[in-house]
Image (cartoon, helix red, strand yellow):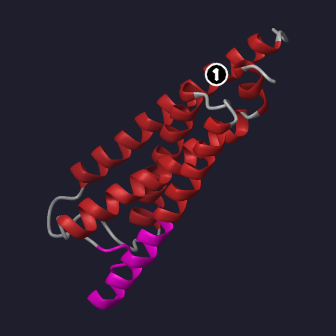
Amino acid sequence: MTTSHDARLNYLGRNLLSGCLLGLGFVAFIDEAVFHQILHWHHFYDKSTPDIGLVSDGIFHAFSWFSTISGAFLVSDLRRRNAWWPKRWIGGFLLGGGAFQLYDGTIQHKLMRIHQIRYNVEIAPYDWVWNIIAAIMLIAGLILIFRTGRESKVMEGTV
């Protein structure tokens, strides 16, 4: 039987991947539920009719759920194998969520212009808050990932 440390070392990537998938799915779900459905600020694709916007929201929602469910299955498998490493997983969660949010705020909002956070208001404060939160999540996630990477080397005895 392997120890928890051995299992963690063997599944470093899977801990990271499951966290990234769940982080991406969670942030996408919050975006969809809060900004699309509750506040009605925008649709995933706003360059067409409202009906097309609703269809695009449905596809986006399905994508977020596929990501969330995939990540949850991976976490379940890691826990079954006694290989779940919460600190590394949280790093992946923050990395996945922050990367999605930064991609959304820069590529989709500014470069592709498929939607904005909100319309008919001064958009700059919304953009700054959205992208700063994304950057904070990314940086925090990367710090945790690098720290657990170093811890894994110490556990292996290679440092």
Left or right: 148 in relation to 1: left
Residue sitting nearer the eye, 91 or 139: 91
Residue drawn at point x = 24 percent, y = 69 percent: 37
- How many other residues sit within 10 Å of disc 1, few (<14), some (14-19) or many (≥20)? some
Picture quadrant of residue 83? top right
Residue drawn at point x = 51 percent, y = 33 percent: 90
Left or right: 116 in relation to 147: left
Q: Is residue 82 above or below residue 78?
A: above
Tell me where residue 52 appears, x and y as whole percent: 36, 88
User: Is residue 39 in sight in this rendering?
Assistant: yes
User: Is residue 117 in sight in this rendering?
Assistant: no
- What secondary structure is the magenta-colored segment mainly? helix
Q: Is residue 54 above or below residue 94?
A: below
**Which residue is the extreme one toward the left?**
121
Residue drawn at point x = 37 percent, y = 59 percent: 29
Picture quadrant of residue 28? bottom left
Tell me where residue 21 appears, x and y as whole percent: 56, 51
Residue sitting nearer the eye, 58 or 70: 70
Secondary structure under tag 1 reads helix
Residue drawn at point x = 14 percent, y = 63 percent: 121
Q: Look at the image and say whether residue 57 sits in the magenta stretch.
A: yes
Q: Is residue 115 above or below residue 3?
A: below
Q: Look at the image and say whether residue 77 sits in the magenta stretch.
A: no
Please give the range of residues in magenta: 43-64
The quarter of the image holding the N terminus is top right
* Residue linked to disc 1: 148
Residue sitting nearer the eye, 25 or 127: 25
Tell me where residue 111 appears, x and y as whole percent: 46, 66
Tell me where residue 72 appears, x and y as whole percent: 54, 50
Residue sitting nearer the eye, 70 or 47: 70
Which amino acid, by three-letter code, is at mark 1? Thr
Left or right: 75 in relation to 105: right
